[in-house]
Image: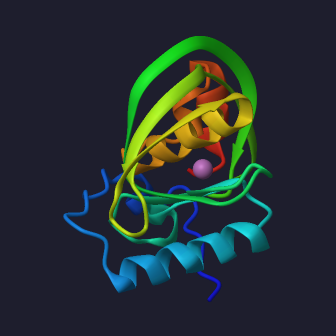
Amino acid sequence: MKLDIKKFPNKILRKKASRLEKVSDSDRAMLRDMAETMYLNKGVGLAAVQVGIDKQLAVIDVGKGLVKVVNPVILTKEGKVIEEEGCLSVPDTTVMVKRSERITVGFLNENGDVSQITAEGLFARAIQHEIDHLYGRLIIDYMSPVKKLFFLTKYR
Ligand code: NI
């Protein structure tokens, strides 16, 4: 089922999402719907808060297969890269964002098993972007003060 994507300045996007104790059937259904919604919108990642759900769930696909993560945590990081990013919740806006180049992430998979992945490049960037969403952070938080001020005038 395609879900409705919440857009800035919707307040849920600023919420720190709740961690899951365990992964239920309804969480698995939500991850499926989130993936469908991501693909239909041609995104490379989507976090549950973006569809109005206060849970630490995210899906990522940068073209190398779908990854579903629950309660993701960055365990190690290496290097820094600055690249342009967009976000389905902040349409028509791109921001240069400095991210770690290579990361290891711990999470629960959709069956609730403890898992770990190593990612680099766009994959690493997309995961970090989605983890930001789970903590209420958005790409606009990486704008220079002048660019952010200009951006915010559109919402006054
Ligand atoms: Ni986003």
In the image, farthest residue toward the left:
21
Q: Percent from the top left, x then y, of residue 67? A: 59, 57
Question: How is the rendered protein coloured?
Answer: rainbow
* 14 relative position to 16: left or right: right
In this rendering, the answer to whether 29 lies above or below 93 is below
Which x, y percent locates residue 9?
51, 56
Q: Nearer the viewer, residue 70 or 141?
A: 70
Q: Residue furthest bottom?
A: 1
**Disc count in the image?**
0
- At horizontal 37% and vertical 85% (from top left) the residue drawn is 26
**In which quadrant of the rendered view does residue 94 lie?**
top right
Q: Position of residue 120 (x, y in %)?
A: 66, 28
Displayed quadrant of residue 88: bottom right
Above or below residue 99? Residue 3 is: below
Please name the residue shown 63% across and 42% down the image: 126
Name the residue at 40% across, 59% down: 11
Is 117 on the left or on the right of 36, as rendered?
left
Q: Quadrant of the N terminus?
A: bottom right
Q: Nearer the viewer, residue 124 or 99?
A: 124
Q: Quadrant of residue 6?
A: bottom right
